[in-house]
Amino acid sequence: MALARTSPKSKAVAVVLAIFFSGFAWLYLYQKCARKFWIFIAVTVGTFVVFAITTVVALGSLVSSGDLLSVASVVFLLLSIVAWMAVHLWSIVDVCVKDDDWYRSFD
């Protein structure tokens, strides 16, 4: 069974997807942007893991007085959130800077 050819993609659709769904816009362009999509997934999962660990550490520091540990975990959480925001911005800029012809010739 032959695979169906993909239709040309629209830059407008890619931009809207990037604005509202961040790195998931690269699923729309997966054939050419798979690596970027998996980097986005890794950073997103990493941010959620750091958030979960930071929450546990913060709750644990309420019980004991490990102030240094909770400060370090909050700093790590902020850094991971900044990384996630950078990947979100990267996805928007990445789809915006590509020429319309790049989307039309997508196959």
Image: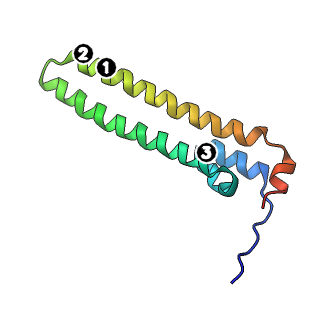
Q: CA distance from mark 3 to mark 1?
A: 29 Å
Colour theme: rainbow
Mark positioned earlier in the residue sequence (3 or 1): 3
Residue indicated by mark 1: 72
Image coords of residue 96 (percent x, y): 75, 39
Callout 3 crowding tier (Cα within 10 Å): few <14, some 14–19, many ≥20: some
The residue located at (85%, 47%) in the rendering is 100
The front one of 19 and 2 is 2
Q: Quadrant of the C terminus?
A: bottom right
- Kind of residue sitting beneath label 2: Leu
42 shown above or below 76: below
Residue projecting furthest to the bottom: 1
User: Residue at label 3?
Assistant: 36
- Which amino acid, mark 3? Lys
Q: Is residue 101 left or right of residue 66?
A: right
- CA distance separating discs 1 and 2: 6 Å
- CB contact under 8 Å: marks 3 and 2: no
- Mark 1: few/some/many CA within 10 Å (<14, 14-19, 20+): few
Query: Which element type, helix, strand or loop, lies under badge 1?
Result: helix
Q: CA distance from mark 3 to mark 2?
A: 35 Å
- Pair 3/1: label in front: 3
Which quarter of the rendering shows the N terminus? Answer: bottom right
Q: Mark on residue 68?
A: 2
How far across and down, in percent of the image, does residue 17 sit?
A: 66, 49
Q: Are marks 1 and 2 in contact (CB under 8 Å)?
A: yes
Residue 18 x %, y %? 65, 44
Query: Within 10 Å of the Cα at label 2, are there few (<14), some (14-19), or many (20+) other Cα atoms?
Result: few
